[in-house]
Image (cartoon, rainbow, N blue to C red):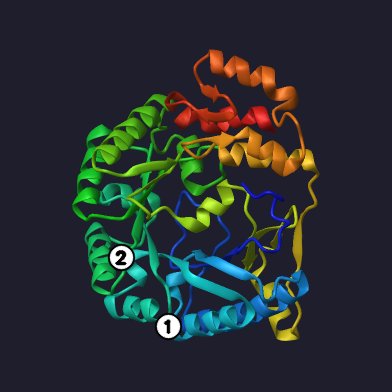
Amino acid sequence: MSSSQGFDEQVPLGVYLHAPFCVSHCTYCDFYTKAYSDGSQVRTFAEALAAGVRNSSEDLEVTGRAVDTLYFGGGTPSLLEPADLEKVMESLRATFRLLPGVEISMEANPESIRREKLRAFRSLGVNRLSLGVQSFQPAILSTLGRAHTARRAMEAIEDARAAGFDNVSFDLMLALPGQGRETVKRDLQTSLSLEPDHLSVYLLEMDKQSALRARIERGELPAPTEDDAAEQYELTRAALTRAGFLHYELSNFAHRDKQCKHNLKYWTDMPFVGFGPSAWSYLAGRRFRELADLEGYLEAAQRGVPPQREGMEGGVEERLEEAIFAGLRLIEGIDLADVGRAYGVEDPLGERRQAILDLEEAGFIRLDGSRLRLTRRSYTIANEIFEVFV
């Protein structure tokens, strides 16, 4: 918990960079993406992103700030060629003070990387790889619209190790149409055999607009139930903790010292700055993003000006709400005394206190002194619990 809600310029920043291109659009995705056409398209974008880092940083007055995490997300940032990434890294190193041991994460899809490319990324400083696997079952991959095969996913993980990555994560998904207990077990067995350092496990979110949701609503695919989600999640949590993983956030499991430092900034109310179309920032108590407009982004770079942004100022109450429900995503929960000091309030729960006590009595939340956390039975319905705070 930042003592100044992201205002302290001595606090190291996290930096997020959004590369929007995808070979295919996954049926469950609602992120800002654009269809990949060829390498020249990505090369042009990389040059614009490098310029955007410089132009936006100067405009936001963060040039020269210390940075301890970089995260390349998307989209599919691994579609960048090493020369493209080098341009962006040069801009980042010229703009910020990258601290020793800086965590540099890159999301990658298995079909977009090979061993030599990964070696080049590693030589440019990328030291954490997050692979979009989702499942090792061909039928599930087809339903999700993934472009890779199960075999290629396994090969990609082996390639990452051979390329020198000692911090490899991949994603799995649960509560999908046609996904039963045995399917989940097979995915877990395969996952553990590949010895990842970190796993992110996501439930299908039916409250987000996506092609997959539309197919379910039209009756073309079976709708997963809340019971399915709870059973599959608990099966996964138990298997991973038995295997020695620390369950540190609702959707994330890691071996010792392999937690994603960048994402922890989101959950601990720390400052970060985003570059690229749709990338969010949290600076000086304000949340804003660069417009989800690739053409506008490229045009701004050509003109040598920062891209357009949109966002909200947010009063203390709004920021306080976000800090609490973001912190509650952590398995250890949040220290309300720290929140109170950070936001200058005596009782961070305020008018929500009775609702929290009611949830505690019902067994959904636990308040130990000043430590507030979800109980295990709330993990799959956390979004409903968070509605108390908004």
Q: Nearer the viewer, residue 345 or 378?
A: 345
Drawn side of residue 298 relative to residue 93, left or right? right
Q: Residue at x 33, y 65 (%)?
A: 110
Q: Position of residue 328 (x, y in %)?
A: 55, 36
Drawn side of residue 178 relative to residue 268, left or right? left
Drawn side of residue 356 relative to residue 101, left or right? right
Q: Residue at x 76, y 59 (%)?
A: 310
In the rendered structure, are the residues bearing label 1 and label 2 in contact, judged by CB atoms less than 8 Å apart? no
Q: Which residue is mark 1?
A: 82
Drawn side of residue 282 relative to residue 164, left or right? right
Q: Nearer the viewer, residue 40 or 100?
A: 100
Please tell me how many numbered marks the rendered image carries: 2
Q: Position of residue 88 (x, y in %)?
A: 55, 80
Amino acid type, label 1: Pro
Q: Residue at x 63, y 64 (%)?
A: 274
Location of residue 96 (image quadrant): bottom right
Q: Which residue is mark 2?
A: 166
Local secondary structure at mark 2: loop
Q: Quadrant where the C terminus lies?
A: top right
241 vs 373: above or below: below
For the residues carrying marks 1 and 2, which lies nearer the camera in this image? 2
Q: Nearer the viewer, residue 246 or 135?
A: 246
